[in-house]
Each structure stands twice: as C-alpha cells, then as structure tokens.
Amino acid sequence: MNDSLRRAAACTLALALWSAGCLLPVRGAEPPVRKAHGIETREPWTTSKIHGTPEPPDPYLTEVAFAKLAFDEPLAMCVVPGGDRLAVAERQGKVFTFVGDEKTSTKSLLLDAGKLVIGLTFHPDYAENGQVFVTEVTSGEGDTKDTVEVVRYMADRASPPRVDPASRQAIIAWKAQGHRGGCLEFGPDGMLYFSAGDGSGIADQDDTGQDLGDLQASILRIDVDRPTSTRRYSIPADNPFVGREGARGEVFAYGLRQAWRFAFDQDTGRLWAGDVGQDLWEMIYLIEKGGNYGWSVNEGNHPFRPRRDKGPTAIVPPIVEHPHSDFRSITGGYVYQGERSPELRGAYLYGDYDTGKIWSLRYDGEKVTENRQLVDTQLRVVSFGQDQSGEVYILDFIGGKIHRLAPAPKSAEPESPFPRKLSETGLFASTKDHTMAKGVIPYSVNAPLWSDGAMKDRYLAIPGDGRIEFETVTYPQPAPGSLPGWRFPHDAVLVKTFSLEMEAGDPNSARRLETRILHHKHMPGTDEVGAQFWRGYTYVWNDEQTDAVLLDAEGLDRTFTIKDESAPDGLRKQTWHFPSRSECTLCHTMASKYALGVNTQQMNRDHDYGGVIANQLSTLDHLGMFTKPLDKQPGEMAKLADYHDEQQSVASRARAYLDANCSHCHRKWGGGNADFQLLATLPLSETGTVDARPGQGLFGLEDPRILVPGHPERSLIHHRMKILGLGRMPHIASGVVDEEAVELVRKWIAEME
C-alpha cells in the first residue's frame, strides 16, 4: 500500500470510529466491557439556561381561523363572488366552498376534478354566469411532459353550489416538466391572468425564460368572455406583444421562473407576484405590462446565465428579494385591507413554504418603505387567501388548516437573556474540555449525516425529570415508510459538536468548529396536527478552543487550511458553512419528525459510555427516559445499517446512507420537489426511483433516470452526489464530495438486477 492510500485508509477508519461514538483504545487502558445498561442511574439535568429565543419577539402569531374545518393538502383559496362563501382547492382535485364565518363547521363539495388542481378562481360575474376556473395537471406518460390546462366549469344555482363535471371546457394548455405555474386571478379589467412556470426543474433547461414564442415562464392575459372561431378565448388587443413576430400574444409579462402565487391589490390594482428562485434568491415582483423579470439571465438582481439571449424589453428588478438563508420557496400573498389588524392595512403580506416565515412590505410607488418579519411559523405556507372584507388567510399545506395573523401578546415578565456563549447554556461543565454537565447524555447514530468529513459528538439534554414519548409522532399521515418519531418535553435540547482535522488522517489534530443545538418548545395542539416547534442555533468556537459564541441569525462561511500530503504543496483549502437559523428548518422538517438522529432506527445501536458498551435504547429505557417502559427488545425494533460496516450488504449500506442524508426531503410531505422517496424502510420498487425519468433536468447525461439498475453512469442519484455547485445533492450544508459514499452507491447500482 502506498503512502497516500495508507493516509486515506487511516482517515476513513478514524472517521468511522468517531462517527460510531467509539474511541481508539489508549495503550494500557482497560478494554471496554459490555453491560445491559451504559448508565446505571439517571442524573437530572438542572442547569439549563436555554429558554426563549435570542431574537426580538415577533409582533404577530398565527391562529386557526376556522377551527372546525380541515382540508387535505389545500393549495388555493379564493372568494366566491356574490355572497359570503369562500372556496378552497385541494391538491387531488376536490374544491370545497364554505361560509366565511369562524364558527362554520360545514364544507360543501363544489367540484371533484379527478386530477391534480393547482389554481382556482371564479368569474367576477359568477353570481350570474356560474363560471368556475381551475388549473388542472395531467401527468405525462413516457417521455412526454405534463399537460397543464386552464379549465372552465359551470356551477348550478343551488345553495351550496355544485359543478356539473360534464360542463368541463379546456381553455388553454401548456407543457411542463417541473415548474407549472398555475395561479389564476381575474384582474380589475375583467381579463383572466394566469401564470406558467418555466416548465423545467433546474436552470431553465429548455431556455424558455426569455422566449416570447411560448407560454412558459410568463404571466398570461386572455379574454374568456369573447371566444374566437378557433379558441375559447381571445387575446386582448392591448396585450404588450400582440403583433410582434414570433411572440405569443397571450404574454403579459415574462422572465418568471415560477410565479406560484400572484394577486391584485384591491385598492390600487397593482399586480404583486412571488417568484420562486433556484440557487440563492427568492423574489417579490410588481408585475408591469410587458415586464421582463430576468429569468434565466438573472436570478433576481444577480447574474445566473448572463450569456443567454435576452428578451426585447429591459429587465425589471425585484421589489424585494430574500437570500436562501431566510426564504427557500416564496409564496406570494395579498395586500391587507381588513379590519382585524388595522396597523397592517396597505401592507403586502407574503411568506415562505420551506421556512414558514411570514413577512410584510410597504411600497410607496417608488421604493419599499418597510420590510419586516411578522412571524416565524411551523406552517407550510403554500398559499394565501383574501375574503370579501380584505382579511388575509394562510393555507398550511401539511396541517390542512386555514390560519390568520393575530397580534402576539406581550409577556408580563420578560424571559431571561438567551445565552450568547456556549459556556452560558448550562450544557457544559467545562467548554474548554468539552465536558458535559450532569444529566446530559451522549449518544451516537447508525448512519451519520455526511458533513464534509467532520467528526461529531452528540448529546441529549432532557431537563429535570422530563420524559420522551416513544414513537408517538406519526403526523403527517399517510406517509408510506415513515416510522413514528419521538415526542420531546418542553425545553429539551439536542447537541452536536462538529470537529475537523487540520491534518488529514490525524484525529489528534481535530479542531472544534461549531456546536449546534436544537431547542424544543412545547406547542398547544394534538398529535393529529403534529404540534412541535424546534429552533436551531449555532455556536462558533473561538481560536483558543475554550468557548463558542452564538452566531447571528444569518449563516457564515469560513475557510480553513488543511495539511494534506495528497494536495498540491501539501495544503488544501476547505470552506466550512455555518448554517443560518432558517437553514436548520430545511432538513429538520415536520415530515422527518424534526429530530433526524434521535429516533428508533438511528439510536438502536451500541454506544461506548466511557468504557461500558451497551445498547442505547435499553440504556434510555433503564433510566426511565421514556414515558412508558419499552414493550419490545431492541432486536425486535427498526435499525438502520451502519454504512461503514463492510460486513453488511452493499444494498443495506447504500440505502441507509441515502435514508440518513436525503430522506428528510425525499419522502412524502418532505418538501423535496421530486416525486420519489429514499426511505430505507420502503421496498425499492415503491420508492419511485427505478427507471423513473428525472423532473429536474438531464445534467448532460444520456437518457438518465433516477436509478438505472446496472448503470450508475445514467443514474442521477449517483451523478448528483459526485458534483459540486449547481445540482449538487445534498444541495445545502455540503461543499465536499463524500468519495466513499459515491463509490458505495456506484457499487450498489452496478450490482442491481
């Protein structure tokens, strides 16, 4: 074995042992012994100083607006003109109406389209003509893209109303493989406006953003009251590109990647839109006639593909843009015109699907005069709605409830200051020595998350005599393959310290970079709505390695010089990303039960408790850490494979790696925008990966699929693990390729039948 291979082997062995929670034996030390329990007696953790939040309190909170109503994956909400009813469209095609009274308990089925519905609106003269408009999606077969259609139905005059399915009329259609758009709104001019996304999943691969010759990447405007001999609509003569050679006359504005939700201001008639970005930015635009919003030459104000051909009109900058440290999938809203919160009148409210944040902005016609966060929620803010009186509502895609804003109550007694130093948290007896306080319990996991080669120490801190509910968190359901999670008591804290070798292959050179904590706050609600709230914080270690300081809400990048004999001149640079607080929520999702490593299949393993080896579940059960004694032995419970253990099968190791690193997004309800799942608990045939066509781009591969048995070179899972930058997976928290895992997954795919 040559020197470079020896160093690589040593580094891999050290990382595997550290990740497993084991230490290399010290010469002369007693070998560890196996016992039934790693800790004999529980010591309560009584020193916690982690309460509340370091942020100024949000001025608002959210409350359920219609307590007795719930919907299955609601996507759109609007007014039913001519009365007091509101309407909600569910993803799977059902549209319900209900009386807009907070005491209402009845929803009435208006329409069952029998297919995916992503947009909903009613004709302004609905009370007279009964016209209902929805955006429907028909999935493509084989190589064909999805078909997105604006469809008109006719409703009867009954109370509540009901649509006649036979009245269906397709008005206009376009193709999409990814961003579909789909928002529908009638403007003050009586014209129907609707959005079409760029039709691809990544980087505008069809180059439609600046192309006026198609409907994609645009907001369109048509007249549905004046059909022609060949169409069920006409193109308004004053549309901006009517008569331009090669342009579609329906285009009102273009250069929009995915204007998922837009709306008109009831007072001014301004058209506001939230445009979902790709790599770094999320945008709010004020839509103008003929406006070019830059995609995919720009992403917001920033170059994206600057060499691509530009459209015929100048690029209009966003009114507001948010970096991905705050927003990840923006949801446009409405200008508030209600009476419940008069201080918000005239403010445009919008939110984010991934982070749950809701913000407002004020615009005086020339500039933004105010832009602030109203509340940081755990909602999946998929859409907003506005009623007849101008009140604004928030649709939670996962919870299925309709929410609204309410002023946050002012606390009579301010909480104690949030600890700004790690030494002030009460988690450590000594930060310098990285010695934990009494009652803080170490743990390890079967399949560690890849963190650019960093080593990790993990701890569980449950205050006082608090106890964990074992496998009681099942929400959201149905969720095939998703195992129940643990429910934690108020003020529970999960701790993880990251260390990086400053000399490759030498664990003794490890430097502590950061300690991340997840802090649990008990929330009202039942198991039916998965009521949990976790906040993530990062403490950055000082150069002296004696303490760490709380990082501000924004993230941080810091570059370290690593001694590495395999690198040119024996040195290489590695940039470490310290996550923002918003970024914590991207992986620690509701669907993954938030605590990624503290669950049965990860914790069901042996751990070295300082010379005593024992199963972690048995140890926690013995200490009374669960509300009820476990009714099974660990051998009867779920367990992920240790992907470093070559004694286990290649398939189980590869799937454990993908489960640990990818399935928090790639599962049902997880937020990943690809329709496949990577839970190891599902049979491979039920994951939607084998021979599945990609929806996010081809990445230069020949006829790729998500997984192609026997062909890793055509398998996008393998390819996207190998690359950095655009298209890398995981797309956050990693800037170094996990070469060992890439080889493991390559071998697994190559061996597949």
Image: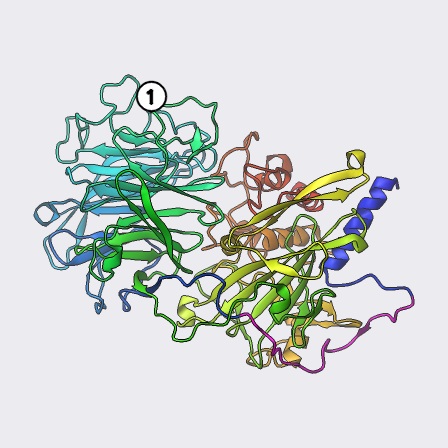
Does residue 49 belong to the magenta stretch?
Answer: yes
Colour mapping: rainbow
In the rendered view, tell whether residue 688 sits above or below residue 109: above
Q: Quadrant of the C terminus?
A: top right
Residue at the (33%, 30%) spot, across then down: 254
Does residue 41 belong to the magenta stretch?
Answer: yes
Residue with the most extreme right position: 28
Label 1, residues with CA under 10 Å away: few <14, some 14-19, many ≥20? few
Say how many tags the image has: 1
Pick whichever, 423 or 207, lies toward us.
423
In the rendered view, tell whether residue 508 sits above or below residue 418: above
Residue 116 in sight here: no
Q: Quadrant of the N terminus?
A: top right
**Residue 377, position as x, y percentages in the image:** 41, 60
In the rendered view, tell whether residue 231 sits above or below residue 324: above
Q: Is residue 256 left or right of residue 232?
A: right
Question: What element does badge 1 sit on?
Answer: loop
**Residue 148, position as x, y percentages in the image:** 32, 38
Pick whichever, 269 or 370, lies toward us.
370
Residue with the most extreme left position: 128
Disc 1 residue type (three-letter): Pro
**Residue 219, position as x, y percentages in the image:** 29, 35
Pick whichever, 692 or 396, lies toward us.
396
Stretch in magenta: 28-50
Residue 445 in sight here: yes
Assign the magenta stretch its main secondary structure. loop
**Residue 500, position as x, y percentages in the image:** 72, 51
Instruction: Please give the residue where the numbered disc 1 appears in the rendered image.
Output: 312
